[in-house]
Amino acid sequence: MHSNGLFLKDVAGFLGGYYTALAVMNAVAAYILWRRKHQTGWAIVWTAFASALMVLASLAMSGSAAWVPALPQAVRSLVNTLSGPVNYTAGTTALLLILFVFRKFFVQPMVAWTVLNGALVLMGLSMADENFASIVMKPDNVPIVGLVFLLAFFTWVATKQAVVNDERIAQGLPPMEKVNDEKVLVWPDLVYTELICMVGVTAFLLVWAILLQAPLEEPASSVKTPNPSKAPWYFLGLQEMLVYFDPWYAGVALPSMVIFGLMALPYLDFNKKGNGYYSIAERKFSYLTFQFGFLELWITLIILGTFLRGPNWNFFGPFEYWSPYKVEVLNNVDLPQMFWVNLLNRPLPRVAADAPWYAHVGTILLRESPGLLIMAAYMLLLPPLLAVTAFRNYFAKMGFIRYMVMINLMLLMLTLPLKMVLRWTLNLKYLISIPEFSLNF
Amino acid sequence: MALGETIRNSQIWKSIFRHPMPLDRRNRIVVMLTNFFLHLHPVSIKKQGIALSFTWCMGGVTFFLFLVETVTGVLLMFYYRPTLEWAYNDILALRDVTSLGILRELHRWGAHAMVITTWLHMYRVFLTGSYKPPREFNWVIGVILLLLTLLLSFTGYLLPWDQLAIWAITVGSNMARASPILGYEGPGQQLLTIGGIDMITDGSDARFGLLGARFVGEETLNRFYVLHCIAIPLAVALLLAIHFWRVRKDGGISGPL
């Protein structure tokens, strides 16, 4: 669907307000830089940028296709063509990795401010696309846009302090949190902060509630299935995992393990450092594991499941029309098929229907032996192997039980990215496929 | 001024607040010790412990949103009847007929916000290593509270009884059908067969227990309504009390030793 004049007229007011808000935000920042921080150079830069945003605001208000600032159609098509589950996952992982490795650079306020402005302007330009806007503006999707910007902001806040603390600790100084440890009375210092927070949250909720109406679709009907049918947004990461796993694993086993793993976390992390202050260098392993699990495997999958999965759970680029007629080739193959048929050129082992039960079980075990062996090696061989190699220190410090719990949780977590890669490279559907017991993995 | 003075010297006022205005050091301490709501807090605290750059205020905001949800939720219960006949129409009327009808908006956006602030609170607690000893168990309680927050939001999602609601719950609860052993499409359910009779069917499995029926219907609406309005909020309230109490007992807000 191509943007038509009507859509742009509808969105003109919003975009005008949006760019104006960004301009005000930059003007305030410029004023603070000028008066408080005495950085006149930067103040001029952001004043100029604010003026440019006001130009964008007035262009957007016109509501005419010729003037509303938008990404060129060629760019949108290119983004649509390039996006897919593989590039999306690889891209977000690479992005997080770059942000992590060069964190000292990215936490500088002016760099972070530039990145934020870039993201916000890109958001504004994208909102002029009808397909993009129709998904992002869905009332229940708005909080996820908020979540993305909030997470980016707070990750910056935390990383900035961790970078400072890590440098101080390297120099033998205590973390900043220690420097600031004089005691103050809770009344008034804390109770007033709380009061202001409550008033702020109330005001924010009221404005949100007035501006955006809660969704109410047609009355429930158990015979009219919407396409796509989606779970509430916070479960869409789990729904996205259904692409790679059966419901028993993606919807029951793995989420239970996530909850269990979170509960076990304080008992597994034996590192006494980094307690009560922001630090990365002192707890790199737990930091990276948590961030990979939270930001990459939870948050980005929610974003993917919400914004980029359309009818029939097909992948759609951010500027692509959600056509229910899009057809995707599904040529996924089970491992037994690959092994017995494709590799050995033999039929799958099978047994007569009236054979005794042990013959059935034996045949299933034989048929599934490649997958069972791989899983046995992964879950049974890797833990002791890692205990004497990469995780030797951990094993020594944690003891047998704690180490086994940790390594098994980690291996379970890694089944998701591993299965993704196997799917993308080998078109692997299931490693183990025992339909006789509804057990597919 | 004189009026204020009269009020503050009245017997009623003095029976409620048993000390003068908290304007000097002594009374600022006394107010924290004598007020039921304030005694949750310590009297004094490290300046660092209340810095917004450190706490992000997300735990407090989450609790405040829980209160907002409780108040707006009770008001919504005055309007809403959880039956197939009325559920959708009541929500419709709430939007179109009631003046200042933003109650449902406040409740719904507050719920979304509460899920987000819970995550941000836990994110902060992780990044400052505040789950480490002696606060391990309070983190565990926090994880249960996270789960209950998600369940609160999930059960509430069904109540408007529109297409968005029942299909989101259908998709979500279909997972239970695949529970190992206990779901009738789950791996190993065939093992629970006694004397040739299958124990786990679509009328007796985990999903049936969740929905009260073979599909999302009136029984489910009733079940989710009770869970949403009574059972889960009570559990959350209890765990919140323990959570806050443990914050104090485990040494107050975390900080470098």
Image: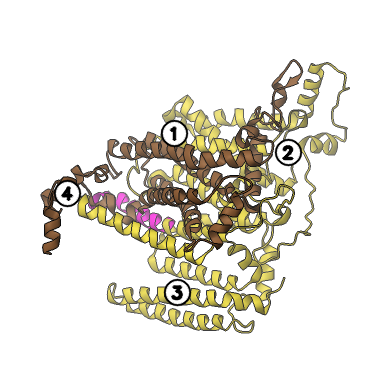
Chain colours: A yellow, B brown
Q: Looking at the rendering, which quadrant does residue A316 occupy?
A: bottom right
Q: Are callouts 4 and 2 both on one chain?
A: no
Under mark 2, the amino acid is Tyr
Chain under label 3? A
Q: Are callouts 3 and 2 both on one chain?
A: yes
* Label 4 neighbour load within 10 Å: few <14, some 14-19, many 20+: few
Q: Are callouts 4 and 1 both on one chain?
A: no
* Label 3 neighbour load within 10 Å: few <14, some 14-19, many 20+: some
Question: Which badge, 3 or 1, is on the more N-terminal residue?
Answer: 3
* Label 2 neighbour load within 10 Å: few <14, some 14-19, many 20+: many
Residue A200 vertical position relative to residue A50 in the rendered view, above or below: above
> Which structural element holds mark 2?
loop
> Label 4 vs label 2: CA separation?
74 Å
> Label 3 vs label 2: CA separation?
50 Å
**Residue A21, labelled with which disc?**
3
Asked whether residue A102 is in view, the answer is: no
Under mark 4, the amino acid is Ile
The residue drawn where x is 77% and y is 39% is A334
Q: Which residues are magenta?
A: A155-180
The residue drawn where x is 39% and y is 45% is B125
**Residue A268, labelled with which disc?**
1
A178 magenta-colored: yes
> Label 3 vs label 1: CA separation?
46 Å
> Which structural element holds mark 4?
helix
Asked whether residue A227 is in view, the answer is: yes
Q: Position of residue A346 (x, y in %)?
A: 88, 33
Question: Which badge, 1 or 2, is on the more N-terminal residue?
Answer: 1
Q: Nearer the viewer, mark 4 or mark 3?
A: 4
Q: Are callouts 1 and 2 both on one chain?
A: yes
Chain under label 4? B
Write down the residue under mark 4. B12
